[in-house]
Image (cartoon, rainbow, N blue to C red):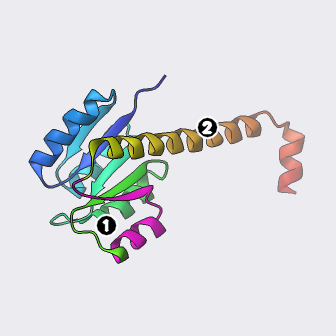
Amino acid sequence: METLHVLLVDDEPRYLETTAKLLTRKGCHVATASSGLEALDYLAVKPVHVVVLDVKMPGMDGHETFGAIRQSHPLVEVILLTGHGTVDSAVEGLKSGAFDYLLKPVDIDLLWEKVSQAWGAYLAHAEKIRMAMLEKSLQSPREIMKKRG
């Protein structure tokens, strides 16, 4: 089975280090980024299934970063995380397609549960795409031409 790849994005080094260690103990591969731009650079070259993304960061904030992730990596599930949660911010994130929105400090077991659920959603979407591609490849040229006509 494929290994879960998680990217933690937060401007607090201590939070990144501690949370990465705890999630790694759960059996997944964890990478960290301390800014939105660093996260996007990482996503451009490494496979990631789930991003845990802090909303309040200097420079490119979490909502901007999330929008960029959605554009370039639509299958990647994103869990928004903040220590400064507001209802408006949560609604904005969830309406934009975030998998979930959690308040810091978050219990590691709850975070792991949400990351695991997000990975399940990622795998389900990837399987649907794979099946659609397989179905299309099994069509005869005549069937394909009928659909275009």
x and y percentages locating residue 116 in the rendered image: 43, 39
Q: Choose between 94 and 106: the one closer to the eye.
A: 106
Q: Residue at x 17, y 66 (%)?
A: 59
Relative vertical location of residue 135 with respect to residue 59 in this rendering, above or below: above
Q: Work out how far the residue at label 2 is from the one at label 1, CA to CA, in angstroms.
A: 28 Å
Q: Is residue 102 left or right of residue 38?
A: right
Q: Residue at x 45, y 55 (%)?
A: 99
Please check the rendered image and state whether residue 100 is part of the magenta-colored stretch, yes or no.
yes
Q: Residues within 10 Å of mark 2 (few under 14, many from 20)?
A: few
x and y percentages locating residue 33 in the rendered image: 20, 47
Please check the rendered image and state whether residue 113 is part of the magenta-colored stretch, yes or no.
no
Q: Is residue 41 left or right of residue 76?
A: left
Q: Which residues are magenta?
A: 88-105
Which quadrant: the C terminus? bottom right
Q: Is residue 85 visible from the viewing direction of this image?
A: yes
Amino acid type, residue under disc 2 in the picture:
Glu
Q: Residue at x 32, y 41 (%)?
A: 109
Please give the label number shown on residue 127: 2
The residue at the far bottom in this view is 88
| 2 and 1 marks in contact (CB < 8 Å) | no
x and y percentages locating residue 41 in the rendered image: 26, 48
The residue at the far left in this view is 14
Please give the label number shown on residue 50: none
Q: Secondary structure at mark 1?
A: helix
Q: Is residue 44 visible from the viewing direction of this image?
A: no
Find disc 1 in the rendering and name its residue: 64
Q: Choose between 145 and 35: the one closer to the eye.
A: 35
Q: Residue at x 26, y 63 (%)?
A: 55
